[in-house]
Image (cartoon, grey):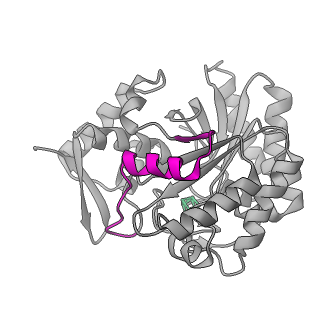
């Protein structure tokens, strides 16, 4: 069992994707209300070697020695991956040693205002930054940023990345009802996206329970209306959970292990992670599918969100 690698997970956007987690749970520059991983316990913009380079490389070499079939190695995980000060070194190592594997960086984008970081990421094949708000009030409400983060610098950082980086930029916007779907906010976001000029704009909405109760996802029709309102030809809605089971890396043994565990007693995401030894991000993907298929339900209790079988 690896500590810093997870998957390969069936990713909606990247096919069979091996995750690399360079950040301990839960260090992030944001504390988004919708975060699937849980509440940010260390809210910071300080870049450090949170996970040691050598340990990640050892695991990576071990995993790659089995000649796995993977489409991407993806930097993502328990927090904001670009907070790790050695992310560029890991990326360069992969490019040199495993040139046939594509790399993707899932980032909240807030640190891209740092010129050095932008340089470190130049070798990635795809960078997927997020931007959920272009208005200060909305930004604070939905993303609850570290106090020293400036929204203008954050947006400018993604614009600068576009100018300096020749790979693909897929910009994700996650919508929550009553948070960032007002007409004013949509107009502000549209202006920011026009300046960023990403290759793709991907609209997303709530998938798993967030860290705040009562969050409401947008319907597919509502997301389609936003695409029409913006008029971007390169905007799309990220495919629904249910399609995951058709991705070749979807593992029925993981699904069965989760179902068997919660059949015994309801569990939180953290419980499942500890019991099954599977990364929270990987478990989250399966929970999303099981929930959308109506096989499991959630219940909010003091210790967190519990998953249990439907119709027990
Ligand atoms: S940026 Fe990502 S990891 Fe950080 S709080 Fe938001 S959703 Fe969670």
Residue at 71% in and 75% down: 149
- Give the answer, above or below, for where 271 lies relative to 149: above
Residue at screen point 55% across, 62% down: 186
Residue 257 seen in this snapshot:
yes
Q: Is residue 168 above or below residue 182?
A: above
Figure quadrant of the C terminus: top left
**Does residue 221 belong to the magenta stretch?**
yes
Q: In x, y percent, where is residue 240?
A: 41, 38
Give the side of residue 281 with respect to residue 104, left or right.
Answer: left
Q: Is residue 212 above or below residue 173?
A: below
The number of numbered badges drawn on the structure is 0
Q: In the image as oriented, which residue stretches furthest toward the left?
A: 311
Whether residue 50 appears in this view of the structure is: no
Ligand 1 found in image quarter: bottom right
Magenta highlight on residue 194: no
251 or 15, which lies in front? Answer: 15
Residue 148 occupies quadrant: bottom right
Residue 163 position within the rendered picture, expressed as x and y whole percent measured from the top left: 87, 50
Q: Residue at x 26, y 37 (%)?
A: 293
Q: Which residues are magenta?
A: 212-236
User: In this rendering, would 287 be left or right of 85?
Assistant: left
Q: Where does residue 57 sit, x and y in percent of width and height?
A: 75, 39
Give residue 81's quadrant in the image: bottom right
Question: In the current view of this chain or complex, which residue is farthest to the bottom?
Answer: 147
Q: Nearer the viewer, residue 218 or 254?
A: 218
- With 59 as the anchor, is 123 left or right in this view? right
In-front residue for pair 56/88:
88
Between 4 and 89, the residue placed more toward the observer is 89
Where residue 144 appears, as percent x and y from the top left, is: 56, 74
């Amino acid at each position: 069992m690896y500590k810093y690698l997870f998957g390969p997970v069936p990713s909606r956007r990247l096919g069979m994707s091996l995750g690399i987690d360079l950040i301990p749970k839960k260090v992030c520059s944001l504390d988004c209300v919708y975060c699937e991983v849980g509440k940010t316990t260390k809210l910071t913009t300080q870049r450090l070697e949170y996970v040691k380079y050598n340990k990640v490389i050892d695991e990576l070499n071990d995993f790659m020695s089995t000649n796995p079939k993977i489409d991407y190695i993806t930097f993502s995980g328990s927090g904001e991956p670009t907070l790790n000060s050695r992310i560029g070194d890991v990326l360069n190592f992969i490019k040199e040693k495993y040139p046939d594997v594509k790399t993707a960086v899932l980032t909240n984008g807030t640190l891209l205002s740092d010129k050095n970081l932008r340089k470190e990421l130049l070798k990635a094949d795809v960078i997927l930054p997020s931007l959920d708000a272009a208005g200060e009030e909305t930004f604070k409400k939905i993303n609850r940023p570290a106090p020293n983060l400036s929204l203008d610098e954050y947006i400018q950082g993604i614009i600068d990345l576009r100018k300096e980086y020749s790979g693909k930029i897929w910009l994700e916007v996650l919508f929550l009802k009553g948070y960032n779907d007002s007409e004013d906010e949509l107009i502000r976001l549209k202006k920011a996206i026009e300046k960023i000029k990403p290759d793709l704009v991907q609209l997303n909405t709530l998938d798993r329970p967030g860290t705040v109760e009562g969050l409401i996802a947008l319907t597919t029709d509502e997301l389609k209306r936003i695409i029409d309102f913006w008029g971007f030809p390169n905007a799309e809605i990220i495919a629904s959970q249910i399609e995951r089971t058709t991705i070749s890396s979807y593992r029925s043994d993981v699904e069965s292990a989760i179902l068997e565990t919660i059949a015994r007693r309801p569990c939180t995401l953290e419980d499942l992670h500890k019991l099954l030894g599977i990364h929270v991000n990987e478990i989250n993907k399966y929970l999303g599918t099981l929930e959308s298929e109506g096989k499991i339900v959630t219940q909010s209790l003091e210790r967190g969100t519990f998953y249990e079988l439907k119709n027990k």
